[in-house]
């Protein structure tokens, strides 16, 4: 069992999730990244820092 680092809600972490995988908290909507497995550890990812190779915010200007 692991808790959201933002809202402390208990979350289910899929066994297939690896370090670097991201998921959304079902409670607060925060983007969380797996930083360690066994024991599991999550960190909150700032929305502006999420990696999306198909989206380049800088190019909107
Ligand atoms: Zn949360």
Image: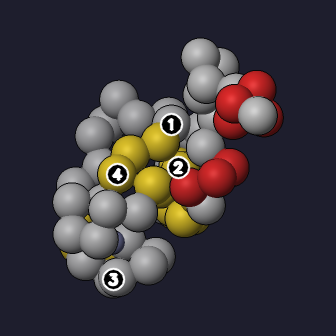
Mark toward the viewer: 4 or 1 = 4
Mark toward the viewer: 3 or 4 = 4
Front-lying residue, 3 or 46: 46
Residue at 46%, 76% in the rendered image: 5
Distance (Cα) linking label 4 and label 1: 10 Å
Distance (Cα) linking label 3 and label 1: 19 Å
| Label 3 beta carbon less than 8 Å to ligand 1 | yes
Q: Residue reaching furthest bottom?
A: 8
Q: Is residue 2 above or below residue 55?
A: below
Do tag 1 and tag 2 residues touch (Cβ < 8 Å)?
yes
Q: Earlier in the sequence, mark 1 or mark 2?
A: 1
Residue 34, label in figure: 2
Q: Residue 36: horizontal and vertical position, in percent?
A: 58, 52
Distance (Cα) linking label 1 and label 2: 5 Å
Which residue in the structure is indicated by mark 3?
A: 8
Helix, strand, or loop for circle 4?
Answer: strand
Which residue in the structure is indicated by mark 1?
A: 21
């Amino acid at each position: 069992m692991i808790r959201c680092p933002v809202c402390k809600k208990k979350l289910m972490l899929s066994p297939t999730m690896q370090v670097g995988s991201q998921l959304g908290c079902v409670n607060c909507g925060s983007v969380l990244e797996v930083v360690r497995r066994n024991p599991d550890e999550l960190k909150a990812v700032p929305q502006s820092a999420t990696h999306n190779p198909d989206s380049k915010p800088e190019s909107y200007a």
